[in-house]
Amino acid sequence: MDKRDKISILLLIFLPIFFLSGTLTSSRTFFMRDLTYLFHPWRSLSAQMIQAGLVPLWNPYEMGGMPFLANCQSAILYPCSIVFWIFHFVLGLKCFHFLHYTLASVGFFLFARKCGFSKMVSFSGSVLFAYNGYSLTRHEFLSVLGSLIWLPWLLIFSIQKINKKNISSLFFCSLSLTFSFLAGFPQILLLQIIFAFLFSFIFTSFKSNIALDNGKFGFKQNILDWLKILILFLLISAPQWMPTLELLQNSIRGGHGISFSEAVTYSFPLDSLLGLIYPFRILHHSDRFTGEKFFWIWSAWWGFTASFLILFSIRSKYKKLITLGISLSVIGILWSMGEYCPFFEFFYEKISFLHLFRYPPVALYLTTSSIALLMLAGFHSIQTAKLNENFRKLILLLLTLSLSLELWFYSKNITPTIIPEYYHVTFNAIKSILKDSPGTVLLSNKVNSQRRLAGMSSQEAQMRFRAYLFDLTNLPYRIKTINPSGEPLALNSFQELYQTLASSPSIEEAKPLINFWNITHFLVEDSLGYGWKLISQDKDLKIYRNPEALGFVFGLEKKETLPNLERERFEFFVPKLLKMGRDKIICQLFYRLKHMVIFTTPFYPGWELYCSTCNLKTKKKISTFIFKNYFTGADLKEGDHMLYLIYRPLSWKIGTILFILTISIFILLAVGMHVRCLAQPLRY
């Protein structure tokens, strides 16, 4: 790497300042969409747990309780998430954005240089890869952004694998895949594996024009090396994929997966194809650049300059690179079209993994990544044209400036910004609930579906909008709710029970289930009748307390189930002692007869119940069962019982052991190789 390479990398490091709407150099920050709905709550809660010295294995505050680390979009094991553990969310977000857009552009620059392209060509390709419409509009979707940037680094190590065939290159290929997976969006990982495998296949199976030494490396060796890479990836990433697989099996995406109608949600329409070049031609979305709807799902624009350069790739000598780029870009577009593509339903029926993914436009990642490759070839063909040298340099400089300015202009104001207090303010409704010792909070369907606020200033409406969410935005305040959050990995048991609650014709008929689920607070616009206590009102939002909620833990006669009975018709027992933790519950119950104990925690693999009576010093493990298809129950004999319900997932334990063993073996191999090198005599 010479001095000019270092200058190019330095320029790339400063580019995020210009492309991120000034948020890196001002106090304002991005908001709305998934930053508000998902990633601020997840990152904030995980940071609080880690700062308290806890491993964030379980999230008791979302949808009645569900695995936390196993939800890969929480990205708890992703190394770059550390910025949210160190800084508050707004500053952590700025660091996260700066780091990832820099890694994306610098990685692609080094990859292009490794392939033999000039500094100017490599610089332009890196700008397009990092700041095309697909990459830039994903700054709100942190799991996608965290995943997509690792492709050029994977390709760099793939080239190392082709050239040297050493174990360190295989390891770093696996590590790149691991980082992409840990960032939280497996669909991107799948697309990267497809892209990188085809890239290495083409340039190892046939003689290439690109600056790679293929030597004796062929198709068979390439297959064997990719098998090694994938096995290493599975071993290194085991602490994440094993709990995630367990969650997937118990979620609404397990079994047969999602329906075809859900799998093709927001398919890319044919009449918006022009929007890939000119973003203002993306149709059917009246608020394309406001950030609240789904403009970003269809965004993959790369601009007129890149399209012009792609045309010149046809006369380039890199024929296989062009074939690969065109093929993958077409596949990405057809895949993204979903229901509008005549072949998609056929492939959906035949290829099972398609049943796990929503939003076909995610596949536009293949297209934009391929376009960056094609632009390299087109730029190179102009650079090698028979022109006056000074004139050629001027053209290259103007094209680079045109490409950068065009993408910068498109990036302006595509997402609204807001004051940083948006993420840190404690709303009145939250203050009122926290003061009243909440159990579980429920937001009424009416408030949940009609959260539009008229008659306010823009900023006040934006702030109030977040205050009304109360599905995931409650997480930083550690308030438990059962409102669905749009989370694709919701537990099957939760989905069924919540549908029972939501389908109840009246609040009176839903009251038995509300009591069993320990719903202590109800947020509603209407007035409630007997059995509810109004504790606070925040403008049109009323907060009621339910004094009949049974609690997080209660005892029940064995003959009782969950019928449509009023509370006074059956006998229940509250614990003498109750201590609640994020992944444990400790309680003491005294029974004169045999009874059941019911925990409002969902029945899920990894929860273990232990009991010690006053006469025993050791803890005894007790078998549990699922009560009413959701709750965790156990049978107890008469007597005084101290109960410990603890979350200890076996999948996490096994995955961690596999990771430690794999890393230990590689460290020993590296040390052994270093010792052998030192033992060899010097040659003069």
Image (spheres, helix red, strand yellow):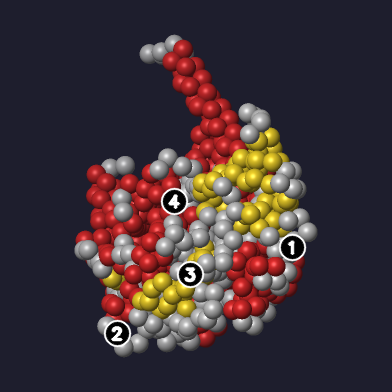
**Sooner in the amino-acid sequence: mark 1 or mark 2:** 2
Residue position marked by numbered label 3 in the rendering: 545
Distance between the alpha carbons at the discs numbered 1 and 3: 25 Å
User: Tags 4 and 1 in contact by the CB under 8 Å rule?
Assistant: no
Distance between the alpha carbons at the discs numbered 3 and 4: 29 Å
Q: Residue at image x 42%, y 77%? A: 542
Could you classify mark 1 by the number of other residues whose Cα lies within 10 Å: few (under 14), some (14-19), or many (20 or more)?
A: few
Q: Nearer the viewer, mark 3 or mark 4?
A: 3
Residue position marked by numbered label 1 in the rendering: 561
**Sooner in the amino-acid sequence: mark 2 or mark 3:** 2
- Which residue is outermost to the front? 592
Q: Residue at image x 57%, y 56%? A: 552
Distance between the alpha carbons at the discs numbered 1 and 2: 48 Å
Could you classify mark 4 by the number of other residues whose Cα lies within 10 Å: few (under 14), some (14-19), or many (20 or more)?
A: many
Q: Is residue 589 above or below residue 617?
A: below
Residue position marked by numbered label 4 in the rendering: 46
Q: Nearer the viewer, residue 660 or 605?
A: 605
